[in-house]
């Protein structure tokens, strides 16, 4: 099991240039998606065949706040012209979609909202995700962003031998 | 693996507040879809009455009422350490954004407290497939031995936030939606709550949740795959658990947007289901988002109990590029199983196979 973290307040544009640099859609993403994108880059960088499409890897993202930072930006835009570009990020699971698209993961993807980081609760849900007979590994992340500048962002690459 | 059954259900909809009442209303061709004055543009939607809410929060009230009815029918002890709770919603109580804590975990905690649930609640917020994904999560909690019973409740309340968002995407029709029709021009939003109690204990008459699957298109965050990749993959997975002749129908997402219905038609076709009866209920309820997977499954169970494939209200002339067996009329159903299919933003797709108990 591999674990990575992005410290709260880190310079994400700089991190993007260090880790990827070839995916300009990154700059359109909300804070949760940016963090999910970068955490996954840290987990799978250099893996053989990393962009070969696969269905055996799940993407499971947990948080308390969902996408509230972006929800506020969308709500601000409502007063003037509601922004479709912001609205699409008002779903807590969009981060899982961004990770799936970037890495061509066509397996399970799910977003969960919990009252707090609860290791036992997350472990139970992750173990249960492996009941899908085609799932062999999972990107699991806790990405909690009360705002664009403060967050908790941790991720793990887990395979079925860890379960 | 431990079989999982539905042993209780509850609904709150503009057409009634019991599954049987709502099913009767659907067979009578009723709908609450109509034009509402908007924010500022008008929008066509199926909305609940605000009259009875009093000082409470509409979201909390409807999800509690639906879940309480399901718990009552199931006759379970909600406070048992062997009873779990999964809430499905996309935006919860987002209308109080800026005034109160809008974390979906707040809604789940209030629901747990209202029902007397003592275990830690889980929220599944997986865009438009949330209800189906929450049922899959509930199944797994039982299959893994974590719980004996899981209350799975879903709800959505419409607000300026959601309506203006869909308007900005130009996804809403200004008339009643027309799933799979050549003239379809967008979706209608809807409000509802729906709940099921899932259990490892059941008698022979109850419905089994046989297999559920969630798959991503890995294609686009707000548009479905043109090849129906994720929907096809989810369908393929659950159909491994059914004999083709046992499947009476597929109750599809059928939002009546051009892209969704075309994508689903292709996924069904790729799965060899071009002759399978297919129906969609969005022309009755609108798109009830976090409630849709649970509500549409409950109504589909009652349809197959009655031996019918419900009509696709709003459909007249097929308007997708491959054959789909969809009808504006009620048809007799043959088989003991059906598949619920949903797709959503974030590229997510889900399929869930239900089978009448005792039909193994």
Image (cartoon, coloured by chain):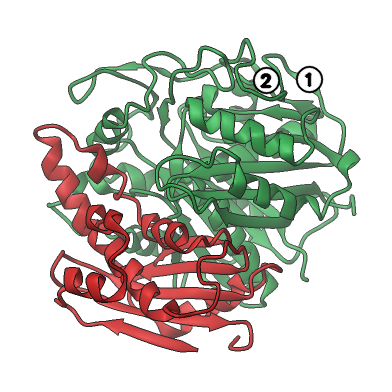
Q: Secondary structure at mark 2?
A: loop
Q: Is residue B329 left or right of residue A23?
A: right
Q: Is residue B220 left or right of residue B317?
A: left
Label 1: chain letter: B
What residue did someone put label 1 on?
A: B331
Residue holding disc 2: B311
Residue pictured at 66% horizontal, 51% vertical: B234
| Earlier residue among tags 2 and 1 | 2
Q: Position of residue A49 (x, y in %)?
A: 55, 72
In this rendering, the answer to whether A100 lies above or below A12 is above
Tell me if B347 is positioned left or right of B164 in this view.
right
Q: Position of residue A19 (x, y in %)?
A: 30, 75
Binning the other alpha carbons within 10 Å of mark 1 as few (below 14), some (14 to 19) or many (20 upward) gives few
Q: CA distance from mark 2 to mark 1?
A: 7 Å
Q: CB under 8 Å between callouts 2 and 1? A: yes
Q: Secondary structure at mark 1?
A: strand
- Between B324 and B310, the one lying in front of the other is B324
Q: Colour of chain B?
A: green
Where does the image place residue B201, in percent across and percent down from the top left? 75, 65
The colour one sees for chain A in the rendered image is: red
State which chain disc 2 sits on: B
The residue located at (41%, 68%) in the rendering is A61
Image quadrant where one finds the C terminus of chain B? bottom right
Image x and y of residue B255, in percent: 51, 30
């Amino acid at each position: 099991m591999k674990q990575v973290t992005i410290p709260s307040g880190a310079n994400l544009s700089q991190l993007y240039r260090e880790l990827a640099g070839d995916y300009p859609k990154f700059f359109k993403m909300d804070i949760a998606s940016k963090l999910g994108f970068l955490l996954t880059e840290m987990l799978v960088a250099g893996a053989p065949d990393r962009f070969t499409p696969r269905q055996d890897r799940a993407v499971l993202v947990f948080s308390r706040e969902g996408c509230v930072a972006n929800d506020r930006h969308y709500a601000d835009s409502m007063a003037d012209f509601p922004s479709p570009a912001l609205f699409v990020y008002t779903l807590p699971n969009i981060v899982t979609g961004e990770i799936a698209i970037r890495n061509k993961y066509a397996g399970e993807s799910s977003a969960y909202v919990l009252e707090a980081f609860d290791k036992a609760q997350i472990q139970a849900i992750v173990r249960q995700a492996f009941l899908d007979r085609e799932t062999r590994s999972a990107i699991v992340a806790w990405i909690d962003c009360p705002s664009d500048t403060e967050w908790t962002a941790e991720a793990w690459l887990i395979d079925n031998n860890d379960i | 693996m431990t079989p999982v059954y539905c042993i209780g259900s509850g609904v709150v909809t503009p057409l009634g507040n019991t599954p049987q009442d709502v099913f009767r209303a659907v067979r009578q061709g009723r709908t609450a879809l109509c034009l509402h004055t908007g924010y500022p543009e008008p929008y066509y939607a199926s909305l609940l009455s605000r009259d009875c809410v009093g000082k409470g929060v509409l979201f909390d009230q409807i999800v509690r009422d639906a879940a309480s009815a399901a718990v009552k029918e199931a006759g379970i002890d909600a406070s048992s350490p062997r009873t779990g709770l999964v809430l499905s919603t996309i935006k919860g109580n987002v209308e109080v954004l800026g005034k109160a804590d809008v974390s979906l975990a707040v809604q789940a905690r209030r629901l747990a407290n209202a029902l007397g649930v003592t275990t830690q609640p889980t929220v599944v917020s997986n865009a438009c497939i949330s209800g189906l994904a929450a049922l899959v999560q509930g199944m797994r909690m039982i299959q893994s031995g974590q719980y004996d019973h899981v209350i799975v409740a879903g709800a959505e309340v419409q607000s300026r936030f959601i309506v203006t968002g869909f308007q900005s995407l130009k996804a809403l029709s200004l008339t009643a939606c027309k799933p799979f029709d050549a003239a379809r021009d967008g979706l209608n939003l809807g409000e509802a709550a729906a709940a099921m109690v899932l259990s490892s204990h059941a008698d022979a008459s109850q419905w089994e949740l046989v297999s559920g699957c969630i798959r991503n298109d890995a294609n686009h965050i707000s548009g479905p795959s043109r090849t129906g990749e994720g929907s096809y993959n989810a369908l393929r997975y659950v159909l491994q658990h059914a004999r083709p002749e046992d499947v009476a129908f597929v109750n599809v997402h059928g939002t009546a947007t051009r892209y969704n219905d075309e994508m689903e038609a292709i996924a069904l076709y790729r799965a060899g289901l071009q002759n399978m009866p297919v129906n969609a209920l969005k022309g009755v309820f609108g798109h009830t988002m976090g409630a849709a997977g649970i509500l549409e499954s409950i109504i589909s169970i009652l349809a197959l109990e009655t031996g019918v494939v419900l009509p696709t209200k709003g459909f007249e002339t097929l308007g997708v590029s491959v054959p789909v067996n969809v009808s504006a009329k009620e048809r007799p159903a043959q088989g003991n199983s059906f598949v619920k299919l949903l797709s959503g933003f974030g590229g997510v797709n889900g399929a869930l196979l239900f089978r009448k108990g005792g039909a193994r």
